[in-house]
């Protein structure tokens, strides 16, 4: 038995285990029934996350369908991640973080120019990672829609005010997702350095797939 | 009728006899409107159409054009998609729209931002303020569950499939039906993240006027809000008018209202620097 605390509770055979470097993209297929575990190794690291149906990648994660169906903006243990055609793609089967974001979207070079100024245009961004990962399989800009930001905290105030604030994650916290269909997962290990989503310091995350 | 079925010329006469029929929900071509703002010439009217309950409409609008939506009877729900007309891979980005403006609720002065750091449309006037950036629209599975069926060909069409048909009229497809906003039906978010839908019905005649800040393709579906709690599929006609207008000048108050918004306008001005 492994003493690795990041593997605790995973019962099935280990299929894949990889540390995604800070700022990098990651693309992997997860078969129906398998569990994907994401470990926030050093804490407060946003993991931008998109899902495509392996059989037909025009079907993809829909933040709006997901939050409508559960009547709540936050993704918690038990949240079912729905596609744009209303089908369950993955389920959050457990997480040691209270909730995760799906309204904040992905940072891009272009949106950085609005949020922080044109001096940030050349900085690496999540949309660059999503493009890089998706282009490898023939998807492109049309395939990038509102994503999930695991380990990211975007509360909405009574007057509608919202913003990315200090993370509610910590080193070693994790989220488990069970695939409800064969899915392609695209991840950007967020490189943002202009807001608190990564504590201004992007760090590696660990991706584990278990049967 | 048997003559109509049997004889092409009788069929022609039958078809031609329908011309000029007026119904409540239809496009008016050429456009005519009796209630344009005082400073708008009738010659500048571009589009006049009333979208049926469960219907959709789409049009390309030039930079500067104004788009006015009127909830004629208080129970319309305008689900809206926007594309850069000359490069439709650039489209409305709902996440950037709320994140960059540091606020989730749409009202006069707010911008509808693209995924390329540019403003596609801005909200000039709004007397309703019950809008929704979070919930998206219904799909066939949802309508089948709620109303028994949700097909385009049935009595209870769903929003996604209406938006898909509208997008298809511009050569776009399933990958292009992006997260939408809903005008006239709203949501409010509680501290724990709970979504409270504001479905009405509301007073008749509420309106929203938008300004195209780029050449845009607008796709509008008018289907019940996805969180409409009523058992019956309920939605009322939506009137759409558009007229020519000036491109936003540098001293425009909406352009200059926030540093983020100003940079979005500057990025648009840079895009059209050609």
Image (cartoon, coloured by chain):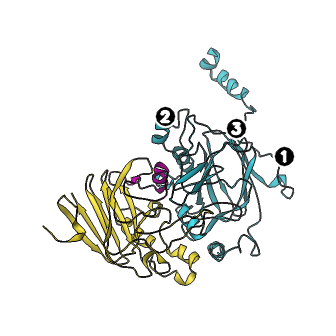
Q: Quick one: which chain is yellow?
A: A
In this view, B5 is above or below A50: above
How many numbered badges does the structure rendering display? 3
Report the residue that reaches farthest toward the left: A1
The residue pinned by badge 3 equals: B25
The C terminus of chain A sits in image quarter? bottom left
Task: Identify the residue at horizontal 53%, vertical 76% (top origin).
Answer: A112
Position of A163 with respect to B111 (left or right) is left
Chain B colour? Answer: cyan
Please determine if labels 1 and 2 lie on a single subunit.
Answer: yes
Task: Identify the residue at horizontal 30%, vertical 54% (top origin).
Answer: A179
Magenta segment: A55-82
| Disc nearer the start of the sequence (1/2) | 1
- Estimate how packed mark 1 is, as few (under 14), some (14 to 19) or many (20 or more) residues with alpha carbons within 10 Å: few
The residue pinned by badge 1 equals: B34
The residue pinned by badge 2 equals: B149
Report the residue that reaches farthest toward the right: B38
User: Which image quadrant for residue A57?
Assistant: bottom left
Task: Identify the residue at horizontal 61%, vertical 41% (top origin).
Answer: B55
Q: Mark 2 lies on which chain?
A: B
| Disc nearer the start of the sequence (3/1) | 3
Residue A59 horizontal/vertical position (percent):
41, 52
Alpha carbon of mark 3 to alpha carbon of mark 2: how far? 23 Å
User: Which image quadrant for residue A3?
Assistant: bottom left
In this view, A65 is above or below B248: above
Alpha carbon of mark 3 to alpha carbon of mark 1: how far? 17 Å
Q: Is residue B176 visible?
A: yes
Residue B32 horizontal/vertical position (percent):
80, 45
Residue B113 horizontal/vertical position (percent):
60, 65
Of tags 3 and 2, the one toward the viewer is: 2
């Amino acid at each position: 038995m492994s003493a690795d605390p990041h593997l605790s509770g995973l019962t099935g055979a280990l299929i894949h285990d990889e540390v995604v470097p800070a700022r990098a993209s990651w693309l992997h297929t997860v078969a129906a029934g398998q569990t994907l575990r994401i470990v926030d190794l050093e804490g407060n690291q946003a993991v931008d996350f998109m899902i495509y149906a392996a059989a037909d990648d025009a079907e993809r994660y829909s933040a709006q369908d997901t939050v409508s169906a559960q009547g709540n903006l936050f993704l918690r243990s038990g949240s079912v991640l729905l596609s744009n055609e209303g089908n369950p793609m993955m389920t959050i089967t457990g997480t040691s973080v209270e909730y995760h974001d799906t309204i904040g979207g992905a940072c891009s070079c272009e949106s950085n120019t609005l949020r922080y100024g044109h001096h940030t245009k050349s900085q690496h961004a999540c949309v660059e990672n999503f493009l890089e990962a998706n282009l490898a399989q023939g998807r492109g800009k049309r395939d990038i829609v509102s994503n999930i930001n695991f380990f990211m905290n975007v509360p909405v105030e009574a007057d509608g005010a919202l913003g990315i604030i200090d993370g509610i994650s910590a080193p070693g916290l994790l989220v488990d997702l069970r695939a409800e269909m064969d899915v392609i997962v695209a991840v950007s290990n967020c490189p943002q350095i202009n807001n608190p989503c990564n504590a201004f310091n992007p760090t590696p995350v660990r991706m584990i797939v278990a049967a | 009728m048997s003559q109509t079925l049997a004889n092409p010329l009788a069929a022609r006469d039958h078809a031609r006899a329908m011309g000029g029929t007026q119904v409540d929900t239809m496009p008016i071509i050429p456009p005519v409107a009796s209630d344009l703002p005082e400073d708008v010439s009738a010659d500048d009217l571009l589009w006049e159409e009333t979208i049926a309950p469960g219907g959709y409409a789409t049009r390309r609008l030039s930079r500067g054009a104004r788009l006015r939506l009127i909830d004629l009877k208080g129970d319309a729900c305008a689900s809206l998609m926007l594309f850069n007309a000359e490069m439709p891979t650039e489209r409305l980005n709902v996440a950037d729209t709320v994140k960059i403006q540091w606020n989730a609720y749409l009202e006069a002065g707010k911008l509808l931002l693209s995924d390329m750091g540019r403003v596609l449309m801005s909200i000039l006037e709004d007397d309703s303020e019950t809008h929704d950036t979070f919930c998206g629209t219904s799909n066939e599975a949802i309508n089948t569950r709620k109303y028994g069926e949700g097909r385009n060909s049935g009595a209870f069409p769903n929003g996604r499939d209406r938006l898909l048909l509208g997008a298809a009229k511009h050569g776009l497809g399933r990958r292009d039906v992006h997260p939408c906003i809903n005008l006239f039906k709203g949501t409010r978010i509680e501290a724990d993240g709970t979504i409270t839908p504001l479905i009405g019905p509301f007073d008749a005649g509420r309106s929203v006027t938008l300004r195209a800040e780029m050449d845009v393709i607008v796709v509008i579906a008018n289907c019940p809000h996805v969180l409409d709690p009523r058992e019956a599929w309920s939605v009322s006609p939506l009137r759409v008018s558009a007229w020519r207008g000036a491109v936003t000048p540098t001293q425009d108050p909406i352009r200059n209202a926030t540093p983020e918004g100003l940079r979005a306008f500057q990025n648009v001005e840079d895009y059209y620097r050609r």
